[in-house]
Amino acid sequence: MAFEVDLLTGIAQHIAGAGLGTWRASGAYTSGETAIVLDTVPATPDRVITLTDYAVSDDPTLSDSMIGIQIRTRWGGLDPRLVKDLDGAIFALLHGMPATTLTGGVRVVSCFRRSGVSMGQDANNRWGRSSNYYTQVHRPSTNRS
């Protein structure tokens, strides 16, 4: 798999392991679950954690890279506190996380939240938030040691 897929899958498994959601590579979830998905924001279920990667910086000679991970959360219902609680629980898990090797072998040196914002309600009255984390990773490649 691509490095980014391994990184996002490892983060998804880490979040699921903390009991904050359910990760399935198949993407099939019941209405009562908090789905953890990659890149897409599915129509259902109402509770979703979406992980999307984006490039931030790469050292030209050393195997140090900074990869951003946008974590979008969504929660159905009229109470915005529930999506804030989910976003806060993810922050408590990831922000300041010590050096870790994720399932799949990606070495995360550090992880911290860079920014976050409320996304308001969607057309189905579900509250959303978006937080951006910077992950410093060890990513050797052909031209970097």
Image: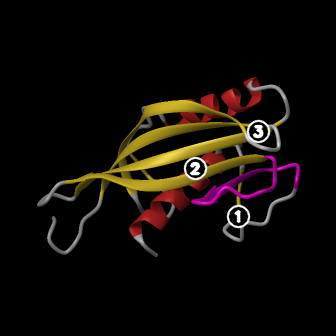
Q: Answer left or right for 21 relative to 4.
A: right
Q: Answer left or right for 137 relative to 92.
A: left
Quarter of the image containing the C terminus? bottom left
The magenta stretch spans which residues? Answer: 31-46
The local secondary structure at tag 2 comes to helix
Task: Determine the residue positioned at 42% across, 72% down.
Answer: 2
- Residue 36 is a magenta residue: yes
- Between marks 3 and 2, how big is the CA–CA gap? 20 Å
- Between marks 1 and 3, how big is the CA–CA gap? 19 Å
Of mark 1 and mark 3, the one earlier in the sequence is 1
The local secondary structure at tag 1 comes to loop
Q: Picture coordinates of residue 67 (x, y %)? A: 36, 51
Q: Mark 2 points at which residue?
A: 14
Dot 3 amino acid type: Trp
Q: Answer left or right for 112 relative to 32.
A: left
Dot 2 amino acid type: His
Which is more toward the observer, 22 or 75?
Answer: 75
Of mark 2 and mark 1, the one earlier in the sequence is 2
Q: Picture coordinates of residue 36 (x, y %)? A: 67, 54
Q: Name the residue under label 3.
A: 75
Q: Which class describes the residues within 10 Å of circle 1: few (<14), some (14-19), or many (20+)?
A: some
Q: Which class describes the residues within 10 Å of circle 2: few (<14), some (14-19), or many (20+)?
A: some
Residue 24 is tagged as: 1
The local secondary structure at tag 3 comes to strand
